[in-house]
Amino acid sequence: MSVTRLKPVDAVVIGVGWTGAIAARELTRAGLSVVGLERGPLRTPGEDFVLPGIRDELRYAIRQELFQDSSVETVTMRHARGEAALPMRRFGAFTPGTGTGGAGSHWNGMHWRYLPYDLNPRRHITQRYGKGAIPADMTIGDFGIEWDEIEPYYDRFEKLCGVSGKAGNIGGRVIAGGNPFEGARTSEFPNPPLVRTAAGDIFAAASEKLGYKPFPLPASNSSRAYTNPEGATLGACAFCGHCERFGCEVNAKASPNTTLFPALLADQRFSLRTNSYVRDLVFDRHAKRVTAVRYVDTRSGEVFEQEAGLVILGGYVFTNTLLMLTSGIGVPYDPATGHGAVGRNYCYQTGAGVQVFFKDGAFNPFMGAGALGTNIDEFNGDNFDHADLGFFGGSTIGVTSGGGRPIQHRPVPPGTPRWGSAWKQATAQWYNRSFGIGASGANYAHRENYLDLDPTYRDALGRPLLRMTYNFRENDQRLAAHSAEQLTRIARAMDATIVSEPALRRGNFHVVPYQSTHNTGGTIMGSDPRGSVVNRHLQSWDAHNLFILGASVFPQNTSYNPTGTVGALAYWATDAIIHQYLKAPGALVAA
């Protein structure tokens, strides 16, 4: 097939979601010509996220309108080496996005900062519990950056998104009403917290009875009209209950489409090419640089080669890892020997949940927002003593009122038939008298959880599919069981009529029920090129003009949603590109 070679540009950004949009905006602001390649269509809030169509649960939540097309590209999955992996024909456990904005268009808006501990857990655990505390098969890694270094970039991303919340620590001073465990902040949140629901009131009262300190979940669902530093205006949340899997018709949920695109698309230095499916990177091994990006126009089938001085991978975890493996950049991870880095430390999340029912309840589950929640962090990170627990990591625990949509939200007490008149009666009786308490738990890296190329199955471009070898390990099982104990204690303190048995993510990982779109790892950051793909500035060890953004650089996954850290790291990396790399192109960290 012939390849059309295009005029060189200063930079190519692959994937125009949160990280790609941030990188493109910062690079064009610095005067560079930037091409953004997006495999899906252009999504414009004023045209695509409007009433009444955007509140179609069947179209968006069930038929997955905004998600990656698994008939074109998917992943295969197995639980262990030696098993045959099979393709995920329909995304279930997680839902990668497609189109401009990526998963940032259909996320819930939970906008967390990681705990200072989360940035360097291996160092912390070793110092607190001893050099032999971490099991040999747990490949926990450190991000290699400190809290004071990344905090300004967290602050900048929060101001971009107009995050609603309450600070718990400003400049080292703990503030009542916020999260007392968070790292020291530069300033208060841009917007006050969202209103607390009746479910949040009950959870907060029970938590305080047990001696805990509840706080509002940081939300990229704006509590009031807000204009961000890019000049984009967000509306106040209408609590329609259609955040996750949907776009926002009032522009209250921050997304790349609402916060960055108005300024980015107006910049003549930026060129957006949609329906452009990147096939591979042209890698000059001798020069240690990527010279061009090859992509297919999915409308015409034409193949183009875009030369650039700088290449930014801003795709999802699977996209970034697949492109590195198929382009031959870096050494693929081998779990048998522990050598190599590309595909290493794939992580997901653990968790547990309890449903509570009140015979005299008066809740309105249909009204909600993706990040309308109340949480506690006493059992998160290393905020509690792990010495005799047999696991590391923790969970953030809370109540979130995301919206009780009619198809997917039908809470009924344990023992209720799954269909028939008894089910109908129960679902009518308990719909507005029930809510869930959830624990979102960390998933630490394990030697046997990784990504590589599948030897059997291929995608629509003829490339091998990415193969996921993953299962919940002993650390995950124990963490989830501990979280379930805390959930049950809090639920009992609520004096509910019925408390369900805790639902745990135990046994083998299952790809069918939705759990979270918080996949991480595969192109991890670190200080040693033998065990990481990028350095602390997210620059490839093997190609100095290649930078990788997104959750694929996380050495493991914490309890929190990754978006806040994804955005902060995107600003951190582009700052290094602009103020260091462009002045002296080459390795920013000695290998």
Image (cartoon, rainbow, N blue to C red):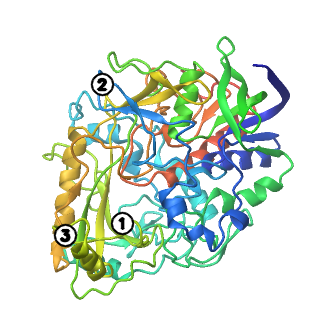
423 or 160: which is nearer to us?
423
Distance between mark 1 and mark 2 Cα atoms: 45 Å
Residue 588 shows up from this direction: yes
335 or 181: which is nearer to us?
335
In primary-sequence order, the first of circles 2 and 3 is 2
The numbered mark at residue 31 is none
| Residue under numbered circle 1 | 180
- Helix, strand or loop status at disc 1: loop
Which-is-in-front pick, marks 2 and 3?
3
Q: Give the image quarter of residue 162.
A: bottom right
Give me the residue at 73% from left, 62% from top: 230
Relative to residue 102, is residue 430 drawn left or right?
Answer: left
Give me the residue at 47% from left, 33% from top: 524
Above or below, 31 relative to 583: below
How many labels sit on residues? 3
| Residue under numbered circle 3 | 416
In primary-sequence order, the first of circles 1 and 2 is 2
Amino acid under label 3?
Answer: Thr
Give me the residue at 65% from left, 49% from top: 99
- Helix, strand or loop status at disc 2: loop
Q: Position of residue 533 (x, y in %)?
A: 51, 27
Amino acid under label 2?
Answer: Glu
Which-is-in-front pick, marks 1 and 2?
2
Relative to residue 538, is residue 268 drawn left or right?
Answer: right
97 or 346: which is nearer to us?
97
The numbered mark at residue 83 is 2
